[in-house]
Amino acid sequence: MNDGRESSAGRLLALIGEHRTTIREALDDEQYTVLLARLGALTEAAPDDDRAVRRALQGVRLALLRLPFDHPVRVVLDRTRLVAAPPEPATVAGARELMALLSSSPSPSPGPEATTPDQPLLAPALSAEEARARCGGAAPPPELIRLADPQGGDRYPEFQFAAGSGTPYQVVLEVNRLLLADIDPWGAAAWWLSGNTWLGGTPASLLGRLPDEQLVGAATALVEGD
């Protein structure tokens, strides 16, 4: 960057490398595999394809939301206010260097208390039939977070529906589009149900209490680079 500051993407990749051991300890095998897959997608993006790099970075940030609230990488992720500007071509090169570092480092297995609770599973949710009823008998919008439950079928986290009307919040649909909830519903759910330092609480608990623009801005801050 012309002002000599490191890009937000560069800072994030550097933090992942610096805290790679504790990241591995904090994530279970499935969550860590997702993170590696998202980083792998970033390494394969064309450096001059801003859209592809942005989408890949978004996937990396969503994967990191599974970290505990007090993890250094998660703290920075929550506190960083990003603005929309094209990511640098060096981002892809940085991701490739990071992947090489991760592949050459020992990977300790997470301990029994190292993994974080799967909050989306613990949150109140509606069945597919209940969600359809909330939508006036129509199919739920594809922007809604739909979590696959092998035991009970598809589940729709209830926070997405307004308490009074029972219909989906429009701001939820807008934010879910930003978070690519149709592609990564678990990552989107983790954002809504995790503490957010910038907002001062979990986004789901602030629906109807904060202006919609603030929630959209917080989601934009996560998915866009500076």
Image (cartoon, rainbow, N blue to C red):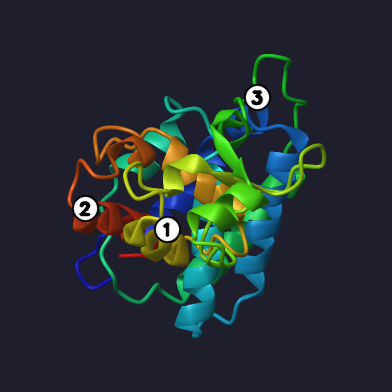
Q: Which of the two labelled residues, at mark 3 and mark 1, occupies the earlier sequence position?
A: 1
Q: Which of the two labelled residues, at mark 3 and mark 2, occupies the earlier sequence position?
A: 3
Q: CA distance from mark 3 to mark 2?
A: 30 Å
Residue in the image at 58% along x and 82% along y: 46
Classify 57 as above or below 102: below
The residue where tag 1 is placed is 10
> Is label 3 in a helix, a strand or a loop?
loop
The residue where tag 2 is placed is 214
> Is label 1 in a helix, a strand or a loop?
helix
Q: In the rendered view, does 15 fall on the left or right side of 36?
A: left
> Is label 2 in a helix, a strand or a loop?
helix
x, y percent for residue 65: 51, 41
x, y percent for residue 167: 41, 55
Classify 182 as above or below 23: below
Q: Nearer the viewer, residue 80 or 186?
A: 186
| Amino acid type, label 1 | Gly
Q: Nearer the viewer, residue 77 or 9?
A: 77
x, y percent for residue 42: 60, 67
Residue in the image at 49% along x and 85% along y: 48
| Amino acid type, label 2 | Gln
The residue where tag 3 is placed is 115
- Residue 100 visible in the displayed image: no
Q: CA distance from mark 3 to mark 1?
A: 26 Å
Query: Which quadrant holds residue 183?
Result: bottom right
| Amino acid type, label 3 | Thr
The residue sitting at the right extreme is: 150
Q: Nearer the viewer, residue 35 or 212?
A: 212
Q: CA distance from mark 2 to mark 1?
A: 25 Å
Q: Nearer the viewer, mark 3 or mark 1?
A: 3
Q: Nearer the viewer, mark 2 or mark 1?
A: 2
